[in-house]
């Protein structure tokens, strides 16, 4: 039922008659063999956002596999938080681990707590302040090279900045540009076809097709480049980087250092920390380019908060609107748009019996774009995240960073970097989208990003003191 409170969701359930029970249903349109893969390729946001019409828990098919999508915030929260019952496993995550290794984002419950404890010190607040100096340098290097009027292909440009920041944050020495570019190309290939590799039958992935060959070459490159960079970094005498913090945590907890595990940690951090930052910034600039009033508000906030042309970590408390812009961007365009879990024992969800081994799909879209939860759910409204407006939202209404023990370990790192970059751009440039943009998502990519977004950047005038 609809609540009369703006921003509130349907109430959760009981069989007492006090509220309607959760419902379950099946999405129409599944095809033999491929299931619902075509709508997931063509317009995943629209397809997934349509699912609440069929129930609070909706069955779809990923290829030949039946999967269930929680479309109610309470159900979504339950699945995210109970990572023992709804674990990362099954054939899909077996394939993920072939690509990304057994890192903190992909390992199963039995291994996750140990990995999380080892990584957590590397993201302590005191270390984030040190990492922020590198963020400032990379943001300044990128924006300082821009001319008074130019166009950029947003995602690749911002991805390069995010990856350079991470490589310098991770490793002791500054990794050379050729190595960064090689890693960037490999990640682009591996994660650009991420879900295709997950969903396609194993025999098709072994065929000598061009896409399969590119994928295999990219994986080989990553498996060679990352260990070499780790080896070079371990020889350096520097305790200020993320890898050093990780090695220190191994020593403090008396856990032997395993090179394969270090490789998986690094791949996880590089993939998640670069793709998510680049995608969030790209979509943010796209939304701001489409909303001049919001862009002017962001510029006014940056003008007031920043002492110079580049934002610093110390500026973050003075950038509340910037943070709301980013949160609203992630609501509409969550970079981590689809994950899977598998039930470890027989259970019941939304009144439906799920045998052990059932696939559950976690995706923000059915909740994030649900008009029963968010008023004008399809519109860009940063002020919906003002404290007084966000307070009535039910738990699970926003899942951009996950929840529970599996909540993103680097959310403060990523949001801080995004806010610094966005405020810096707003301080110095007007942003407009150029004709010919293709904002359809890359089909079945691991992270939700547009195919092509060209932006026109025009230097703001001398009235802002930036001539």
Image (cartoon, rainbow, N blue to C red):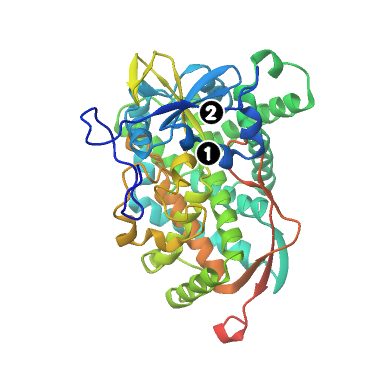
Quick one: SS at disc 2? loop
Across and down, in percent, residue 88 comes to 43, 24
Q: Position of residue 451 (x, y in %)?
A: 69, 46
Q: Is residue 279 above or below residue 357?
A: below
Q: Residue at x 49, y 22 (%)?
A: 67
Can residue 64 be seen by looking at this rendering? yes
Viewer-side residue, 376 vs 328:
376
Rendered image: mark on residue 27: 2
Camera-nearest residue between 339 and 3:
3
User: Is 440 displayed left or right of 135 in the figure?
Assistant: right
Label ID, residue 226: none
Measure the alpha-carbon separation of dots 2 and 1.
Answer: 9 Å
* Quadrant location, the C terminus: bottom right
- Residue farthest bottom in this picture: 463
Q: Is residue 204 left or right of residue 65?
A: right
State if disc 1 and disc 2 touch (CB < 8 Å). Answer: yes
Seen at 29% across and 55% down, the residue is 391
Rendered location of residue 162, percent (x, y): 56, 51
Badge number at residue 50: 1
Asked if residue 400 is positioned above or below residue 140 in the image, the reply reads: above
Say which quarter of the image contains residue 63.
Answer: top right
Residue 195 sits in quarter: top right
């Amino acid at each position: 039922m609809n609540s009369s409170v703006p921003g509130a969701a349907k109430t959760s359930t009981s069989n007492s008659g006090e509220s309607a029970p959760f419902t379950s249903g099946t999405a129409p349109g599944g095809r033999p063999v491929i299931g619902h893969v075509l709508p997931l390729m063509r317009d995943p946001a629209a397809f997934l956002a349509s699912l609440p019409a069929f129930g609070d828990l909706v069955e779809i098919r990923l290829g030949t596999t039946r999967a269930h999508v929680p479309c109610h915030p309470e159900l979504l929260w339950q699945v995210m938080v109970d990572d023992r019952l709804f674990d990362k496993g099954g054939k899909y995550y077996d394939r993920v681990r072939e690509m990304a290794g057994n890192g903190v984002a992909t390992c199963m419950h039995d291994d996750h707590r140990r990995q999380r404890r080892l990584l957590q010190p590397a993201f302590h607040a005191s270390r984030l302040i040190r990492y922020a100096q590198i963020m400032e340098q990379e943001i300044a290097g990128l924006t300082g090279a821009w001319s008074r009027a130019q166009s950029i292909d947003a995602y690749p440009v911002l991805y390069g900045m995010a990856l350079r920041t991470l490589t310098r944050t991770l490793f002791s020495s500054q990794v050379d540009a050729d190595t960064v570019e090689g890693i960037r190309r490999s990640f682009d290939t591996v994660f650009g076809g991420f879900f295709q590799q997950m969903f396609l039958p194993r025999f098709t992935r072994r065929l000598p097709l061009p896409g399969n060959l590119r994928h295999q070459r990219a994986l080989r490159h990553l498996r060679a480049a990352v260990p070499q960079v780790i080896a070079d970094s371990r020889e350096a005498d520097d305790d200020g980087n993320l890898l050093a913090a990780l090695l220190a945590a191994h020593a403090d907890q008396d856990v032997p250092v395993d090179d394969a595990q270090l490789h998986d940690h690094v791949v996880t951090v590089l993939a998640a920390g670069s793709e998510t930052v680049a995608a969030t910034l790209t979509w943010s600039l796209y939304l701001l380019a489409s909303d001049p009033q919001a862009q002017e508000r962001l510029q006014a906030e940056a003008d007031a908060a920043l002492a110079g042309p580049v934002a610093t970590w110390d500026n973050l408390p003075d950038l509340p609107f910037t943070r709301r812009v980013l949160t609203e961007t992630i609501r509409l365009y969550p970079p981590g748009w689809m994950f899977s879990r598998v039930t470890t024992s027989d259970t019941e969800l939304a009144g439906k019996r799920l045998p052990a081994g059932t696939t559950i799909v976690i995706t923000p879209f059915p909740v994030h774009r649900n008009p029963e939860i968010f008023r004008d759910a399809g519109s860009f409204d940063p002020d919906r995240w003002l404290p007084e407006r966000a307070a009535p939202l039910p738990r699970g209404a926003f899942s951009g960073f996950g929840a529970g023990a599996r909540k993103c370990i680097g959310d403060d790192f990523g949001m801080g970097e995004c806010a610094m970059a966005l405020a810096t751009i707003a301080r110095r440039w007007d942003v407009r989208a150029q004709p010919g943009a293709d904002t359809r998502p890359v089909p079945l990519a691991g992270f939700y990003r547009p195919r092509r977004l060209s932006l026109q950047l025009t230097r703001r005038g001398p009235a802002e003191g930036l001539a």
